[in-house]
Image (cartoon, helix red, strand yellow):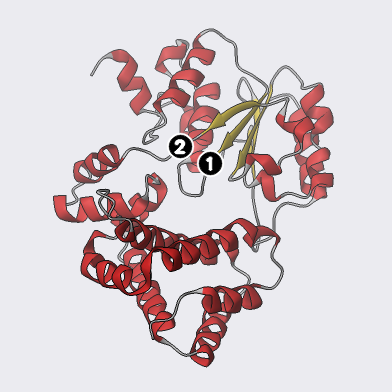
């Protein structure tokens, strides 16, 4: 491994080499921006990249190419979450940060760093922050103190005020390639067959893949949710409404959990639709191939595409949807029947 790739490895980010390269170059030439916007779907590693960059910015190594070193006081403090110069603003109790918290962060960014080069604030899920609260950051974005760095994280960059977006360096993350995901899992002790399944199911989301590798629950929930979907498809109207009720009680107001379930169904419907169209693409849900083939034959391409679209619609409107129970009712009634 050469010097460059060893330092890149210290970033601990799976995939996204171009983004790491871009940020490393900025560090090396002292051309850091005051604001970044890291966007992309959940579990891609946005927070991981943000923390690694924060670490690299404040790492005590003189040579920028060696940062982050993972070994100095600053790197260790970021890793432990105890760096006084790094502020992380994120959801609490499933609620996005309110205007007071954004204002508080803006004040904190105006203070000189206590122990490091920069005062850094990472704003997680900034696209869920209300526009008025987003606006509270505008003045700091327009006239940032020399030592302030803001890293905004968003699943959907379009939901960030254009005035905010235009002042940030955009870093749109894409899913990691299948082979990279698979190799990463194998290098962490996973056997090849399981690595292949997890890599496919992850759809390139490293965070999801590593979670699935670390605990059995992630795959168990997937199994349970695919079985629930099977029951819904076989069920009567009344059974579907009951299933929607049970699921909405289970997820409560936790939209992240429901998003996870919808993601599972989305990949499944995509597999069914591809099967209907005789696509040569290998299904994500490779362990359910026979079931997918049978379902595709039974419902046909129009129904499969309609079910995929209905699932995507619900995913897209999830953040603004106030009544998840009703939305689930509608989704389950939209799904095709098997009679
Ligand atoms: Zn360091």
Q: Is residue 60 visible?
A: no
Q: Nearer the viewer, residue 59 or 214?
A: 214
Residue 35 position by quadrant = top right
Q: Nearer the viewer, residue 209 or 201?
A: 201
Q: Secondary structure at mark 2?
A: loop
Residue 132 position by quadrant = top right
At 77% from the left and 27% from the top, the residue drawn is: 141
Q: Nearer the viewer, residue 255 or 117?
A: 255
Among numbered discs 2 and 1, the one appearing first in the sequence: 1
Query: Is 102 drawn above or below residue 57 in the view shown?
Result: below
Q: Secondary structure at mark 1?
A: loop
* Residue 284 locus on image (x, y percent): 30, 55
* Residue 221 locus on image (x, y percent): 38, 70
Q: Mark 1 — residue? A: 40
Give the Cα separation between the discs numbered 2 and 1. Answer: 6 Å
Q: Which mark is residue 215?
A: none
Image quadrant in which the N terminus is located: top left
Image quadrant in which the C terminus is located: bottom left
Mark 2 Cα shell of 10 Å, populated few (<14), some (14-19), many (≥20): some
Q: Nearer the viewer, residue 142 or 314?
A: 314
Residue 218 falls left or right of residue 334: left
**In the orientation shown, which residue stands out farthest toward the left?**
192
Q: Is residue 253 visible?
A: yes
Q: Is the Cβ of the residue at disc 2 closer than 8 Å to that at disc 1? A: yes
Q: Mark 2 — residue? A: 174
At 63% from the left and 61% from the top, the residue drawn is: 318
Residue 176 position by quadrant = top left
Mark 1 Cα shell of 10 Å, populated few (<14), some (14-19), many (≥20): many
At 41% from the left and 29% from the top, the residue drawn is: 11
* Residue 251 locus on image (x, y percent): 55, 74
């Amino acid at each position: 491994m050469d010097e460059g790739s060893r330092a890149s490895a210290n970033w601990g980010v799976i995939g996204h080499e171009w983004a790491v390269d871009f940020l490393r170059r900025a560090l090396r030439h002292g051309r850091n921006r005051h604001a970044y916007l890291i966007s992309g779907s959940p579990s891609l590693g946005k927070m991981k990249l943000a923390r690694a960059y924060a670490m690299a910015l404040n790492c005590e190594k003189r040579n920028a190419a060696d940062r982050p070193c993972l070994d100095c006081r600053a790197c260790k403090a970021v890793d432990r979450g105890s760096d006084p110069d790094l502020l992380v603003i994120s959801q609490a109790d499933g609620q996005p940060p309110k205007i007071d918290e954004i204002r508080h962060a803006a004040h904190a960014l105006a203070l000189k760093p206590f122990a490091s080069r920069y005062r850094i604030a990472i704003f997680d899920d900034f696209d869920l922050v209300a526009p008025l609260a987003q606006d509270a950051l505008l003045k700091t974005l327009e006239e940032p103190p020399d030592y302030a760095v803001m890293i905004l994280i968003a699943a959907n960059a379009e939901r960030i005020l254009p005035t905010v977006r235009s002042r940030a360096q955009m870093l749109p993350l894409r899913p990691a390639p299948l082979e990279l995901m698979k190799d990463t899992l194998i290098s962490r002790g996973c056997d090849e067959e399981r690595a292949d399944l997890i890599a496919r199911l992850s759809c390139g989301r490293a965070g999801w893949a590593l979670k699935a590798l670390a605990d059995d629950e992630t795959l168990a929930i997937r199994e349970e949710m695919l079985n629930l979907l099977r029951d819904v498809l076989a069920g009567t109207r009344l059974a579907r409404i009951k299933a929607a009720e049970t699921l909405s009680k289970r997820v409560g107001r936790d939209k992240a959990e429901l998003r996870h379930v919808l993601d599972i169904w989305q990949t499944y419907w995509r597999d069914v639709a591809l099967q209907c169209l005789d696509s040569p693409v290998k299904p994500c849900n490779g362990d359910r191939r026979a079931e997918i083939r049978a379902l595709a034959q039974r419902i046909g391409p129009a129904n499969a595409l309609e079910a995929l679209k209905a699932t995507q619609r619900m995913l897209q409107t999830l953040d603004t949807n106030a009544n998840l129970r009703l939305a689930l009712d509608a989704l389950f009634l939209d799904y095709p029947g098997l009679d």
